[in-house]
Image (spheres, helix red, strand yellow):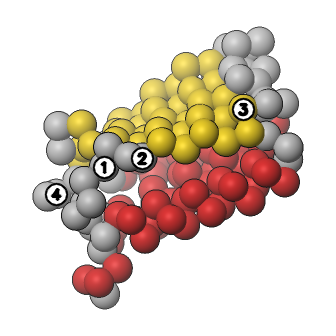
């Protein structure tokens, strides 16, 4: 439904999910999206993967990071949505074996949208995930 293409509906769901998930874990949330244009639309094929990537990152921070604070930032940069989720937790090694598929699925979903994924993390230094996804305006 074209009426649901507006990014603000997705943004509302993201913020509510982060508030509930992180609040339940006693983690402070900073959510910054004020620089997004009010008329920003999200292609239907991008909405679900973006939301699932967001949920995975927030859930991982709540379950594994031992963080006290998570910062979420969303902005439009040169026609691409840039979303970052950062925590002040314990970090992890990208090279270490992992039991779950979260890191792999995040990369796959974003690459399937023509986007890029950047991880900035190491044991003891927190984690920052930054994804960039091109959006049609």
Real-space CA distance between mark 4 and mark 3, rounded to the nearest whole angstrom: 32 Å
Q: Earlier in the sequence, mark 1 or mark 4?
A: 1
Q: Which tag is nearer the camera, tag 2 or tag 4? A: 2
**Which image quadrant: the C terminus?**
bottom left
Residue annotated with mark 2 = 33
Which residue corresponds to the image point at 62% horizontal and 44% vertical from the top-left?
57
Contact between marks 2 and 4 (CB within 8 A): the answer is no
**Upstream in sequence: badge 3 or badge 1:** 1
Q: What is the spatial separation of the Cα atoms under label 2 and label 4, in whole angstroms? A: 18 Å
The numbered mark at residue 36 is: 1
Asked if the residue under mark 1 is in contact with the one under mark 2, i.e. CB atoms within 8 Å, the reply is yes
Q: Nearer the viewer, residue 59 or 99?
A: 59
Distance CA(mark 2)–CA(mark 3): 17 Å
Is residue 48 found left or right of 36 in the rendered image? right
Q: Position of residue 96 (x, y in %)?
A: 73, 21
Q: Could you say where residue 116 lies in the image, as x and y percent from the top left?
A: 36, 36
Q: Residue at x 64, y 25 (%)?
A: 127
Residue lying furthest front: 34
- Residue of label 4: 136
Q: Give whichever of 108, 22 is nearer the camera.
A: 22
**Quick one: SS at disc 3?**
strand
Gap in angstroms between the C-alphas marked 3 and 1: 23 Å
First reached walking from the N terminus: tag 4 or tag 3? 3
Residue 50 in which image quadrant: bottom left
């Amino acid at each position: 439904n074209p009426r649901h293409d507006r990014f603000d509906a997705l943004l509302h769901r993201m913020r509510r999910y982060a508030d509930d998930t992180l609040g339940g874990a006693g983690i402070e949330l900073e959510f910054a999206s004020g620089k997004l244009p009010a008329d920003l639309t999200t292609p239907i094929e991008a909405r679900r993967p973006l939301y699932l990537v967001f949920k995975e990152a927030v859930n991982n921070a709540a379950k594994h990071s031992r963080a006290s604070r998570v910062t979420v930032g969303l902005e439009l940069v040169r026609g691409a949505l840039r979303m970052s989720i950062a925590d002040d937790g314990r970090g992890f090694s990208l090279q270490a074996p992992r039991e779950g598929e979260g890191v792999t699925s995040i990369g796959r979903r974003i690459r399937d949208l023509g986007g890029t994924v950047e991880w900035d993390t190491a044991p003891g230094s927190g984690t920052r995930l930054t994804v960039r996804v091109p959006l049609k305006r």
